[in-house]
Amino acid sequence: MNSVRFLASPLRRALAVSVLALGASAAMAQDNAPIRMLVGFPAGGSTDVIARNLALGMEKVLGRPVVVENRAGAGGQIAAQVLKASKPDGTTIFLSNSHALTMIPHTLKAPGYDVGKDFVPVGLVAINPDVFAISTTAASGVSSMKDFGAWAQKNATAGNVGVPAPASVPDFAVGVVAKALSADLKSAPYRGDGPVAQDVLAGQIAAGIGSVGVMLPQVSTGKVRILAVNGTTRVASIPDVPTYAELGIKGLEDQIFTAVIAPAGTPADIVRRYNTAIAQVVATPEMREKLSNLGITLMSSTPEALGQRITASSQASAALVKAAGYQPQ
């Protein structure tokens, strides 16, 4: 009997060691698995550019592949739904602009996700403020928002302002600007701010609202002039351009931001690890050099600070929607 116990004990120990080894191997495989970074817009846009540069940097810091996956459509709504359905194991994250997180929940009755319940904040990546730009061809002689208001009053049928999407911050901003300037302005929704910038450049439309990263490159042609920027402070790449608030136009102090989020239930240690990696990448001279020419301000934060930013931006979006009298679709 004693000899049986003696033989069984090493067997049990061997089995226990095997189980632990398998568990360690599975955890190691998970740590080395590729990370899928969802992007809610097509390749080539400013959000995609941020994503690809961030992915390259995170690969170096984390020592594992980070693959950008474009799930374009509905202003990031589709990508957000994909994130919600993903396993909370750190293999899927979402680089989202604030529209999907703070505006869509107020404009759609059933967006397919609940930001507070379905996601966890990981870290802020960048601030990409919107600007109000005019065509110097279509709106000749206009050099300020006051000038544009006077011009629009005389050219009511031409007072359309291009915006990246319906029911977006720029869409509602047109109403805020129209009221402040006492001008009959109408928003003209496009599919993204790239086409808006191109039509402003070509003089097909008198004005447009889009990200500073999209509008700024057009300024050098002399055919586009930026008149205002949202936020509470001026943007370093366009220091001569005043904020709306400086011009007496209130309600557009919130800025579009880009951040990384993960599925709810993602372990806290993974969130912290990714947050640290993002902060390191954002601080590199290489990342700043690549994106500064687009007027994008790189900025990192803790997960908690990002959560607070999402809440504040959501409140600002709710106020815009309410002021416009918009009913969720």
Image: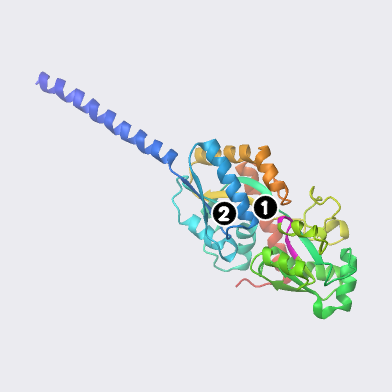
> Where residue 106 sits in the image (x, y, percent)?
63, 64
Asked whether 210 or 223 is in front, the reply is: 223
Asked whether 22 or 179 is in front, the reply is: 22
**Closer to the camera: disc 1 or disc 2?**
1
Q: Secondary structure at mark 2?
A: helix
Find the magenta span and give its range. Answer: 209-213
> Where residue 127 sits in the image (x, y, percent)?
70, 50
* Amino acid type indicated by mark 1: Phe
Sort mark 1 into few (<14), some (14-19) or many (20+) by Cα contacts within 10 Å: many
Q: Is residue 169 left or right of residue 31?
A: right
> Where residue 86 sits in the image (x, y, percent)?
45, 53
Choose top left, top right, bottom left or bottom right for residue 229: bottom right
Nearest to N terminus: mark 1 or mark 2: 2
Which circle marks residue 257 in the picture? 1
Q: Secondary structure at mark 1?
A: strand
Alpha carbon separation for disc pair 1 and 2: 17 Å
Q: Residue at x 65, y 41 (%)?
A: 282
Quadrant containing the C terminus is bottom right
Residue 210 included in the magenta stretch of the image = yes
- Is residue 221 visible in this depiction of the protein? yes
Sort mark 2 into few (<14), some (14-19) or many (20+) by Cα contacts within 10 Å: few
* Amino acid type indicated by mark 2: Gly
Helix, strand or loop: magenta stretch: strand
Q: How is this picture coloured?
A: rainbow
